[in-house]
Image (tube, helix red, strand yellow):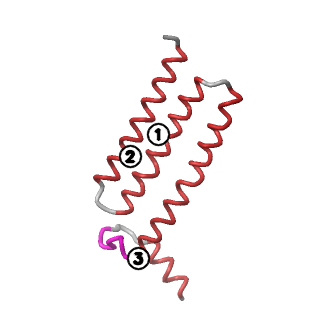
Amino acid sequence: MTVRDWICAVLLLSGALFCLIGAYGVLRLPDVPSRLQAATKPQTLGLLLILAGTAVRLEPRYAVGLVLAGLFQVITAPVLSQLFGRTAYHTGAIEKSTLVTDELDERLRAERG
């Protein structure tokens, strides 16, 4: 095996591990905000590592598509997580007694006057 093969293997396995950790977090964490964190952060890092491992094996001109896929994921995942969290908050799916600080409630009260 060459060094390139080892780098590819390490990146792919690391990415798969992060995705597995994120999936475990979604299943085991108790509330919506925690699950959103588990669904967003390790999954995004895992995908980026998998894409990087794949890019190591490709010619640079083909790896551009992987860079675009990674960029799309980095941009959209936090935005969607924010929207899902806000929707969960407004529909009452978040137990407010578990929040340490409720900045959204403070902001909504300030906007109402």
Q: Give the position of the C terminus as an image quadrant.
A: bottom right
Residue 47 higher or lower than 37, as above or below? above
Q: Is residue 69 magenta?
A: no
Do the residues under discs 1 and 2 have CB atoms within 8 angstroms? Answer: yes
Q: Is residue 73 left or right of residue 88?
A: right
| Residue at (62% x, 37% y) in the render | 66
Q: Is residue 45 left or right of residue 32?
A: right
Label 1: which residue?
46
Q: CA distance from mark 3 to mark 1?
A: 30 Å
Label 2: which residue?
22
Residue 113 higher or lower than 36, as above or below? below
Mark 3, secondary structure of its residue: helix
Which mark, residue 91? 3
| Residue at (47% x, 65% y) in the render | 84
| Residue 107 pos. (x, y %) | 51, 77
Question: In the rendered structure, which segment of residues is drawn in magenta?
Answer: 90-98
| Residue 35 pos. (x, y %) | 37, 57
Mark 1, secondary structure of its residue: helix
Crowd rating for badge 1 (residues with CA inside 10 Å; few <14, some 14–19, many 20+) = many
